[in-house]
Image (cartoon, grey):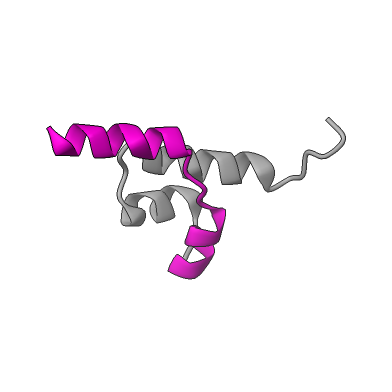
Amino acid sequence: MEDLRLHDPRHEAVSRFFEYGLTAHEVALVSGHRDPRMLSRYTHLRPEKMAEKLAKAAT
């Protein structure tokens, strides 16, 4: 794992917490982010998960 950096697991966890339905406040509490801008930098949702949520909302 040459490209693994110390913050990579945190980045992954933050993104998955949002996909599991936690609110921004809950994720910030778990991750320790105080600034919402920094929290959003760590969040990268998977497009297929977003598509699933939109499909559920449309029904």
Above or below, 32 against 58 in this view is: below
- Is residue 12 among what the camera can see? yes
* Side of 57 relative to 32 (left or right): left
**Relative to the observer, which residue lies in front, 35 or 55?**
55
Magenta: main secondary structure equals: helix
Say if the magenta span includes residue 41: yes
Q: Please tell me which residue lies in front, 58 or 53.
A: 58
Q: Considering the image in quadrants, where does the N terminus appear?
A: top right
Q: Residue at x 26, y 39 (%)?
A: 54
* Figure quadrant of the C terminus: top left
Q: Position of residue 15 (x, y in %)?
A: 48, 43
Based on the displayed image, in which of its 4 quarters is residue 5 positioned?
top right
| Residue 15 left/right relative to 5 | left
Q: Is residue 32 left or right of residue 1?
A: left
Q: Residue at 49% of width from left, 69% of height from top?
A: 37
Part of the protein shown in magenta: 35-59
Q: How far from the left and from the top, in percent, is residue 46? A: 48, 38
